[in-house]
Image (tube, grey):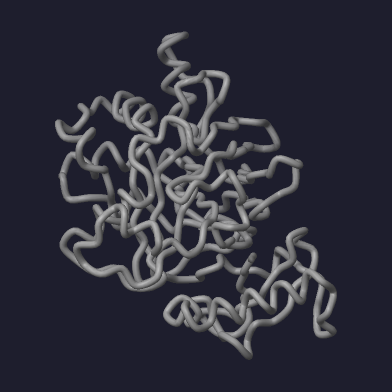
């Protein structure tokens, strides 16, 4: 099942079901007005949404419309909580080396995680507006999961059943500000502006064999101004999986339905996989040539993030954003 949110209908938008080809959609308002509403009542609402989605696929609905990606908000236009991890250690090592920071002593026993801005997210085609292009503007291509209510103390084995949706994530980072903000050892604020998510969120069964219940194993494609940056496999070199991230977050608190959990910029040890952020490309350039040649984003630049299935069809739709001056 594929779900999306129209921008109209207030801050939380209007929930719709979308066909597999991402060409046609139908309103789910009579079942659940918003995705947040559905997640809070998932056991009751999900079967009805699945039935509506199946009827859309079979051509049994009359009240359908052409899907306009530009009219979509992020599947959750806002969330009670957004937690982002960093489980691809290759990325963590490069990013820290680039800013002259050491690896934390327990990074192989406890996942690295921060709590990000969640009171609003950009839509998948919305511009990313920032005040200054000298802030080291970077993207991070990621996969995120959305959970239902997770009790405090949930174990990793228990956590897998709480994953209800999967989506792509563009976690913007202002690298210049990480150098001054992270040494304070109190987390991100200014260095992490709002994020954006794929046009649709999908239920795990939609991913077939690529989803094993704990992680997704497909290449995540990213492009800057149309130039391919990378195609790292999201399941490869993943040190902690999603249930482990959920259990880590729920150790001392419960997680409300609609909590989003990311796994960090995807990074493979294989150099042929390319990059899912500019910082890694620059780190390799400095190592090989003594200086970086790939620039940070400037106003007018664009980024595209997408994932294709085995048949070459888009799964989530593409995040396509242009950087603009606020």
Quadrant position of residue 75: bottom right
Q: Nearer the viewer, residue 225 or 6?
A: 6
Q: Residue at x 37, y 38 (%)?
A: 175
Residue at 27 percent across and 36 percent down: it is 179
The structure residue drawn at horizontal position 65% and vertical position 68%, both measured from the top left corner, is 72
State left or right for residue 238 relative to residue 201: left
Where is residue 242? Give x, y as percent. Answer: 38, 50
Q: Residue furthest bottom?
A: 30
Q: Position of residue 217 (x, y in %)?
A: 54, 39
Q: Is residue 80 above or below residue 171?
A: below
Q: Position of residue 184 (x, y in %)?
A: 16, 44
Count the marks: how many? 0
Of the pair 31 and 205, the residue shown nearer to us: 205
Query: Could you say which is closer to the camera, residue 216 or residue 193?
Result: 216
Residue 129 position (above or below residue 220): below
216 and 75: which one is in front?
A: 216
| Left or right: 108 as drawn, with respect to 58 | left
Task: Check the image and name the residue furthest to the top.
Answer: 289
* Residue 26 drawn at (x, y percent): 73, 78
Quadrant position of the N terminus in the picture: bottom right
In the displayed structure, 78 sits above or below 87; it is: below
């Amino acid at each position: 099942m594929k779900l999306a949110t129209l921008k109209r209908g207030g801050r939380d938008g209007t929930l719709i079901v979308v066909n597999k080809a991402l060409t046609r959609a139908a309103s789910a308002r009579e079942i659940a007005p918003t995705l947040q509403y559905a997640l809070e009542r998932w056991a009751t609402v999900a079967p009805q949404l699945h039935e509506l989605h199946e009827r859309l696929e079979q051509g049994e609905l009359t009240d359908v419309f052409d899907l306009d990606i530009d009219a979509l908000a992020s599947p959750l236009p806002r969330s009670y909580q957004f937690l982002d991890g960093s489980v691809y250690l290759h990325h963590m090592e490069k990013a820290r080396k680039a800013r002259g920071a050491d690896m934390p002593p327990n990074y192989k026993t406890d996942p690295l995680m921060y709590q990000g801005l969640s009171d609003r997210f950009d839509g998948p085609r919305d511009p990313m507006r920032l005040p200054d292009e000298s802030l080291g503007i970077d993207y991070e291509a990621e996969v995120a999961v959305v959970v239902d209510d997770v009790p405090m103390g949930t174990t990793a084995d228990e956590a897998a059943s709480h994953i209800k949706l999967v989506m792509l994530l563009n976690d913007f980072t202002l690298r210049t500000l990480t150098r001054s903000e992270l040494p304070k050892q109190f987390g991100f604020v200014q260095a992490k502006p709002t994020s954006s998510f794929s046009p649709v969120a999908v239920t795990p069964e939609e991913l077939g064999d690529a989803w094993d219940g704990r992680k997704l194993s497909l290449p995540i494609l990213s492009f800057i101004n149309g130039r391919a940056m990378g195609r790292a496999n999201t399941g490869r070199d993943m040190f902690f999986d999603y249930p482990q991230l959920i259990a880590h977050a729920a150790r001392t608190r419960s997680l409300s339905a609609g909590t989003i959990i990311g796994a960090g910029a995807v990074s493979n040890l294989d150099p042929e996989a390319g990059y899912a952020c500019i910082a890694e490309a620059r780190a390799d350039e400095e190592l090989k040539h003594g200086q970086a040649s790939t620039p940070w984003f400037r106003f007018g630049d664009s980024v595209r993030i997408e994932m294709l299935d085995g048949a070459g069809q888009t799964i989530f739709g593409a995040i396509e954003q242009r950087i603009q001056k606020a």
